[in-house]
Amino acid sequence: MFLDERLEKILEILKNEKKVKVTDLAEKFNVSEVIIRKNLKRLEQEGKLKRTHGGAILLKKLVHSSTLEERIINRTKQKEIIAKKIIENIENGETVFFDVTSINYIAAEYLANSEKEITLITNMPSITTHFNKDSKVDIIMIGGEYNKKIGGNIGSEAINYIKKYNVDKAFVGSAGIDLETQKVMNFEVNDGNTKKEIMNISKKIFLTTEYEKIGILGNYKFSNLSDFDVFICEKTQKDYLESYKKVFDECEILII
Protein backbone atom coordinates (compact mmCIF):
# COMPACT_ATOMS: atom_id res chain seq x y z
CA MET A 1 0.00 0.00 0.00
CA PHE A 2 1.33 3.43 -0.97
CA LEU A 3 1.81 6.10 1.70
CA ASP A 4 -0.95 8.41 0.45
CA GLU A 5 -3.37 5.51 0.31
CA ARG A 6 -2.55 4.54 3.92
CA LEU A 7 -3.01 8.14 5.10
CA GLU A 8 -6.41 8.27 3.41
CA LYS A 9 -7.43 4.99 5.05
CA ILE A 10 -6.31 6.25 8.47
CA LEU A 11 -8.52 9.33 8.08
CA GLU A 12 -11.45 7.17 6.97
CA ILE A 13 -11.08 4.98 10.08
CA LEU A 14 -10.79 8.09 12.23
CA LYS A 15 -13.98 9.60 10.79
CA ASN A 16 -15.81 6.36 11.54
CA GLU A 17 -14.45 5.66 15.01
CA LYS A 18 -13.52 9.21 16.19
CA LYS A 19 -10.22 7.96 17.63
CA VAL A 20 -7.45 5.51 16.69
CA LYS A 21 -4.61 3.71 18.46
CA VAL A 22 -1.10 3.36 17.09
CA THR A 23 -0.97 -0.34 17.99
CA ASP A 24 -4.24 -1.11 16.17
CA LEU A 25 -3.20 0.78 13.03
CA ALA A 26 0.24 -0.88 12.96
CA GLU A 27 -1.44 -4.30 13.09
CA LYS A 28 -4.08 -3.38 10.50
CA PHE A 29 -1.61 -2.04 7.92
CA ASN A 30 1.15 -4.52 8.81
CA VAL A 31 3.76 -1.82 9.43
CA SER A 32 5.76 -0.76 12.48
CA GLU A 33 4.42 1.55 15.18
CA VAL A 34 7.22 3.97 14.30
CA ILE A 35 5.84 4.35 10.78
CA ILE A 36 2.30 4.88 12.07
CA ARG A 37 3.50 7.58 14.45
CA LYS A 38 5.18 9.33 11.52
CA ASN A 39 1.95 9.05 9.53
CA LEU A 40 -0.07 10.55 12.38
CA LYS A 41 2.48 13.36 12.80
CA ARG A 42 2.16 14.26 9.13
CA LEU A 43 -1.64 14.27 9.29
CA GLU A 44 -1.49 16.46 12.39
CA GLN A 45 0.78 18.92 10.58
CA GLU A 46 -1.80 19.05 7.78
CA GLY A 47 -4.45 19.96 10.36
CA LYS A 48 -6.46 16.77 9.90
CA LEU A 49 -6.16 15.23 13.38
CA LYS A 50 -4.76 15.74 16.86
CA ARG A 51 -2.28 13.24 18.24
CA THR A 52 -2.86 11.83 21.71
CA HIS A 53 -0.87 9.49 23.94
CA GLY A 54 -0.84 6.24 21.96
CA GLY A 55 -3.02 7.42 19.10
CA ALA A 56 -5.03 10.29 17.65
CA ILE A 57 -8.47 11.89 17.65
CA LEU A 58 -10.44 13.59 14.91
CA LEU A 59 -9.91 17.33 14.70
CA LYS A 60 -13.17 19.16 14.08
CA LYS A 61 -12.93 22.12 11.75
CA LEU A 62 -14.58 25.48 12.37
CA VAL A 63 -16.33 26.88 9.32
CA HIS A 64 -15.20 30.25 7.98
CA SER A 65 -17.75 32.70 6.64
CA SER A 66 -17.61 33.98 3.07
CA THR A 67 -19.85 36.12 0.90
CA LEU A 68 -22.51 34.66 -1.39
CA GLU A 69 -20.61 36.00 -4.40
CA GLU A 70 -17.45 34.15 -3.32
CA ARG A 71 -19.41 30.94 -2.88
CA ILE A 72 -21.12 31.29 -6.27
CA ILE A 73 -17.77 31.85 -7.99
CA ASN A 74 -16.59 28.61 -6.36
CA ARG A 75 -19.02 26.66 -8.56
CA THR A 76 -17.79 23.16 -7.87
CA LYS A 77 -18.85 19.85 -9.41
CA GLN A 78 -20.33 18.90 -6.03
CA LYS A 79 -22.61 21.94 -6.00
CA GLU A 80 -23.74 21.22 -9.56
CA ILE A 81 -24.73 17.65 -8.63
CA ILE A 82 -26.67 18.81 -5.56
CA ALA A 83 -28.46 21.53 -7.56
CA LYS A 84 -29.61 18.96 -10.14
CA LYS A 85 -30.86 16.68 -7.36
CA ILE A 86 -32.89 19.57 -5.96
CA ILE A 87 -34.65 20.10 -9.30
CA GLU A 88 -35.38 16.37 -9.54
CA ASN A 89 -37.22 16.61 -6.22
CA ILE A 90 -39.55 19.43 -7.26
CA GLU A 91 -42.93 18.57 -8.78
CA ASN A 92 -45.25 20.67 -10.93
CA GLY A 93 -47.77 22.71 -8.96
CA GLU A 94 -45.70 22.87 -5.77
CA THR A 95 -44.78 25.94 -3.76
CA VAL A 96 -41.09 25.82 -2.94
CA PHE A 97 -38.76 27.94 -0.80
CA PHE A 98 -35.12 28.48 -1.75
CA ASP A 99 -32.97 29.60 1.19
CA VAL A 100 -29.91 31.84 0.64
CA THR A 101 -27.20 29.45 -0.58
CA SER A 102 -24.89 29.24 -3.59
CA ILE A 103 -26.33 25.78 -4.30
CA ASN A 104 -29.87 27.18 -4.50
CA TYR A 105 -28.57 29.92 -6.79
CA ILE A 106 -27.32 27.23 -9.18
CA ALA A 107 -30.54 25.22 -8.74
CA ALA A 108 -32.57 28.32 -9.70
CA GLU A 109 -30.62 28.51 -12.95
CA TYR A 110 -31.55 24.90 -13.76
CA LEU A 111 -35.14 25.57 -12.71
CA ALA A 112 -35.37 28.57 -15.06
CA ASN A 113 -34.33 26.33 -17.97
CA SER A 114 -36.75 23.55 -17.05
CA GLU A 115 -40.43 23.03 -17.93
CA LYS A 116 -41.55 22.92 -14.32
CA GLU A 117 -44.51 25.09 -13.34
CA ILE A 118 -44.17 26.03 -9.68
CA THR A 119 -44.30 28.93 -7.27
CA LEU A 120 -40.84 29.80 -5.97
CA ILE A 121 -40.46 31.83 -2.78
CA THR A 122 -37.01 33.08 -1.86
CA ASN A 123 -35.18 35.65 0.25
CA MET A 124 -32.23 35.68 -2.20
CA PRO A 125 -32.76 38.57 -4.69
CA SER A 126 -30.01 37.43 -7.09
CA ILE A 127 -32.06 34.35 -7.96
CA THR A 128 -34.53 36.47 -9.92
CA THR A 129 -31.92 37.25 -12.59
CA HIS A 130 -32.30 33.70 -13.94
CA PHE A 131 -35.96 34.11 -14.89
CA ASN A 132 -37.36 35.96 -17.91
CA LYS A 133 -40.93 36.92 -18.87
CA ASP A 134 -41.51 33.54 -20.53
CA SER A 135 -40.65 31.54 -17.42
CA LYS A 136 -43.29 29.16 -16.07
CA VAL A 137 -42.09 29.81 -12.52
CA ASP A 138 -43.99 32.35 -10.42
CA ILE A 139 -41.63 34.12 -8.01
CA ILE A 140 -42.41 35.64 -4.63
CA MET A 141 -39.61 37.72 -3.16
CA ILE A 142 -39.36 37.98 0.62
CA GLY A 143 -38.76 41.56 1.73
CA GLY A 144 -36.78 42.89 4.67
CA GLU A 145 -33.30 44.09 5.41
CA TYR A 146 -30.74 43.04 2.81
CA ASN A 147 -27.52 41.64 4.24
CA LYS A 148 -24.75 42.25 1.70
CA LYS A 149 -22.44 39.56 3.01
CA ILE A 150 -25.10 36.86 3.29
CA GLY A 151 -26.60 37.92 -0.04
CA GLY A 152 -30.20 37.83 1.12
CA ASN A 153 -33.00 39.41 3.12
CA ILE A 154 -32.71 38.15 6.70
CA GLY A 155 -33.70 39.14 10.22
CA SER A 156 -36.95 40.21 11.89
CA GLU A 157 -38.56 41.94 8.90
CA ALA A 158 -37.84 39.03 6.58
CA ILE A 159 -39.19 36.62 9.19
CA ASN A 160 -42.46 38.61 9.38
CA TYR A 161 -42.84 38.23 5.59
CA ILE A 162 -42.02 34.51 5.69
CA LYS A 163 -44.69 33.84 8.33
CA LYS A 164 -47.40 34.81 5.83
CA TYR A 165 -46.77 31.77 3.65
CA ASN A 166 -46.98 27.98 3.65
CA VAL A 167 -44.80 25.93 1.32
CA ASP A 168 -44.67 22.31 0.22
CA LYS A 169 -40.89 22.03 0.28
CA ALA A 170 -38.00 24.12 1.58
CA PHE A 171 -34.38 23.66 0.53
CA VAL A 172 -32.15 24.92 3.33
CA GLY A 173 -28.37 25.14 3.32
CA SER A 174 -25.90 24.70 6.15
CA ALA A 175 -22.31 25.69 6.85
CA GLY A 176 -21.68 22.67 9.06
CA ILE A 177 -23.19 19.49 10.52
CA ASP A 178 -21.95 17.95 13.76
CA LEU A 179 -23.20 14.36 13.72
CA GLU A 180 -21.93 13.75 17.24
CA THR A 181 -24.28 16.35 18.73
CA GLN A 182 -26.68 16.36 15.76
CA LYS A 183 -26.41 20.14 15.45
CA VAL A 184 -26.95 21.90 12.13
CA MET A 185 -25.05 25.18 12.03
CA ASN A 186 -24.28 28.36 10.16
CA PHE A 187 -22.19 31.41 11.03
CA GLU A 188 -24.70 34.28 11.39
CA VAL A 189 -27.47 34.58 13.98
CA ASN A 190 -30.00 36.51 11.88
CA ASP A 191 -29.48 34.15 8.96
CA GLY A 192 -29.96 31.19 11.31
CA ASN A 193 -33.18 32.60 12.76
CA THR A 194 -34.47 33.23 9.24
CA LYS A 195 -33.72 29.62 8.31
CA LYS A 196 -35.71 28.49 11.37
CA GLU A 197 -38.80 30.36 10.16
CA ILE A 198 -38.44 28.94 6.65
CA MET A 199 -38.46 25.48 8.21
CA ASN A 200 -41.51 26.36 10.33
CA ILE A 201 -43.67 27.11 7.26
CA SER A 202 -42.59 24.03 5.29
CA LYS A 203 -44.34 20.67 5.00
CA LYS A 204 -41.15 18.91 3.91
CA ILE A 205 -37.66 20.17 4.72
CA PHE A 206 -34.55 19.35 2.70
CA LEU A 207 -31.05 19.91 4.10
CA THR A 208 -28.79 20.55 1.10
CA THR A 209 -25.03 20.84 1.42
CA GLU A 210 -21.77 19.20 0.40
CA TYR A 211 -20.71 15.92 2.00
CA GLU A 212 -17.54 17.57 3.29
CA LYS A 213 -19.64 19.83 5.53
CA ILE A 214 -20.36 16.83 7.75
CA GLY A 215 -18.02 17.20 10.72
CA ILE A 216 -17.52 20.92 10.11
CA LEU A 217 -18.51 23.28 12.93
CA GLY A 218 -20.30 26.61 12.62
CA ASN A 219 -20.59 29.13 15.41
CA TYR A 220 -24.41 29.19 15.56
CA LYS A 221 -26.79 26.24 15.83
CA PHE A 222 -30.03 26.99 14.02
CA SER A 223 -31.55 23.51 14.04
CA ASN A 224 -31.29 19.87 15.06
CA LEU A 225 -30.60 17.28 12.39
CA SER A 226 -33.82 15.44 13.27
CA ASP A 227 -35.85 18.51 12.21
CA PHE A 228 -35.12 17.70 8.56
CA ASP A 229 -36.87 15.13 6.39
CA VAL A 230 -34.34 14.68 3.59
CA PHE A 231 -30.59 15.16 3.19
CA ILE A 232 -29.13 15.91 -0.23
CA CYS A 233 -25.42 16.00 -1.00
CA GLU A 234 -23.34 15.05 -4.04
CA LYS A 235 -22.71 11.45 -2.94
CA THR A 236 -25.00 8.45 -3.23
CA GLN A 237 -26.00 6.58 -0.08
CA LYS A 238 -23.61 3.69 -0.73
CA ASP A 239 -20.65 6.09 -0.55
CA TYR A 240 -21.46 7.37 2.96
CA LEU A 241 -19.41 6.26 5.95
CA GLU A 242 -21.37 3.70 7.96
CA SER A 243 -21.24 5.91 11.05
CA TYR A 244 -22.88 8.71 9.02
CA LYS A 245 -25.63 6.42 7.75
CA LYS A 246 -26.38 5.30 11.29
CA VAL A 247 -26.96 8.86 12.55
CA PHE A 248 -29.16 9.82 9.60
CA ASP A 249 -31.16 6.62 10.14
CA GLU A 250 -31.59 7.38 13.85
CA CYS A 251 -32.87 10.85 12.92
CA GLU A 252 -35.26 9.29 10.37
CA ILE A 253 -33.81 11.32 7.52
CA LEU A 254 -33.98 10.07 3.94
CA ILE A 255 -30.63 10.25 2.12
CA ILE A 256 -30.82 11.17 -1.56
Image: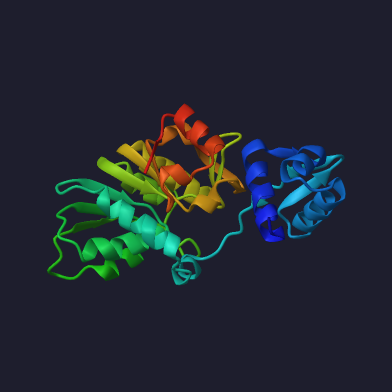
Q: Nearer the viewer, residue 186 or 115?
A: 115
For the C terminus, give its image quadrant: top left
* Left or right of 212, for residue 134: left
The reply to whether residue 162 is in sight is: yes
Residue pictured at 22% horizontal, 46% vertical: 95
Residue 160 vs 245, above or below: the answer is: below
Q: Is residue 61 above or below residue 111?
A: above
At 54% from the left edge and 51% from the top edge, which residue is drawn?
213
Query: Would residue 170 be found to the left or right of residue 61 on screen?
Result: left
Pick the residue in front: 109 or 143.
109
Relative image position of residue 154 (x, y in whole percent): 43, 53
- Is there any visible trace of residue 124 in the rendered image? no
Quadrant where the image shows the N terminus:
bottom right
Q: Is 57 located above or below residue 64 in the figure?
A: above
- The outermost residue toward the top is 250
Camera-side residue of 144 and 166: 166
Q: Is residue 176 left or right of residue 36?
A: left
Residue 88 position, x and y percent, is: 26, 51
- Identify which residue is drawn at 35% across, 48% down: 171
x then y, percent, for residue 22: 81, 42
Determine whether, in the image, residue 229 is placed left or right of residue 8.
Answer: left
* Tag count: 0
> Residue 38: x percent and y percent?
83, 55
Say how the picture is coloured.
rainbow
User: Which residue is painted at 35% across and 58% down in the image?
Assistant: 83
